[in-house]
Amino acid sequence: AVFHMLTHAFFKALMFLGSGSVILGCSHEQEMTRMGGLWKKMPITAATFWIGNLAITGAPFFFSGFYSKEAVLTQAAIFGQDSGFVHLIPYIFGALGAGLTTFYMFRLVWMTFHGKPRDQWVYDHAKESPWNVVLPLIIISGFAAVVGWPLAAKTSMAENLGFTNVVEFGVLAWLTIVLSLMGGLYLFRRRNDPHVSSLLRGGAWS
């Protein structure tokens, strides 16, 4: 839990600073529904934001969030297996929370940096943030990626949690990500449905 607080500090700081960079680069526009396609205009911000996104969603095996978040979830799962279904509730809610994080983070990145511009004025006036903004992004993104590596080197931790190797240790992470992306794909394919389009604020995924 303490280790997850450490990794969380890096990728959460990266997300907030990256969001500020986007707002600054878009002339203080804050509505994602008016953005889109900003990868070409803000490549450094977009690249570091992607690193933060993969770290916060716990993408195996390169990014720090995987090693800290999945350590917490797998320990909760093992405790539940040994103690009965009632004790699985913390893991279930933790996994659901991780899935929601994956869903809204990939939605955020897609809406902001990919697809077609939704507001031509915002896109035309968008530009990369100055170096006093993007340099901290680069530095923090490095920590967000590699701060989990010391734990990766200690495969004994995976064994202590009941797994034989780090690959098996990542099964729960892959399951969470795949289910979240399937949910996102479903909503994307149903974006013309009035209820879904309302949820996505007017088909903002398109």
Image (cartoon, grey):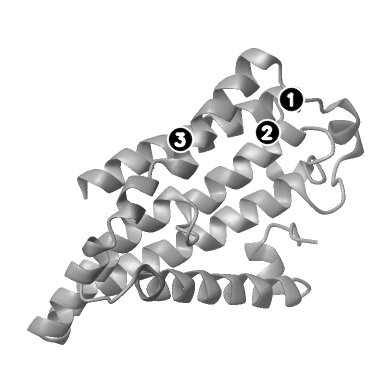
- Label 2 neighbour load within 10 Å: few <14, some 14-19, many 20+: many
Left or right for 150, reference 167:
left
Under mark 2, the amino acid is Thr
Q: Position of residue 137 (x, y in %)?
A: 57, 28
Question: Which circle's residue, 1 or 2, is located before the other in the chain?
Answer: 1
* Helix, strand or loop at mark 1: helix
Q: Where is residue 170 in the image (x, y as percent from the top left)?
A: 40, 70
Question: Which circle's residue, 2 or 3, is located before the other in the chain?
Answer: 2
* Helix, strand or loop at mark 3: helix
Under mark 1, the amino acid is Gly
Q: In the rendered view, tell whether residue 96 sits above or below residue 129.
A: below
What is the CA distance from the residue labelled 2 to the residue labelled 3?
16 Å
User: Of circles 2 and 3, which is in front?
Assistant: 3
- Residue at which label 1 appears: 25
- Residue at which label 2 appears: 45
What is the CA distance from the residue labelled 1 to the residue labelled 3?
24 Å
Residue 193 visible in image: no
Where residue 191 sits, quadrant-wise, is bottom right
Question: Which circle's residue, 1 or 3, is located before the other in the chain?
Answer: 1
Front residue of 15/135: it is: 135
Left or right for 159, reference 188:
left
Under mark 3, the amino acid is Phe
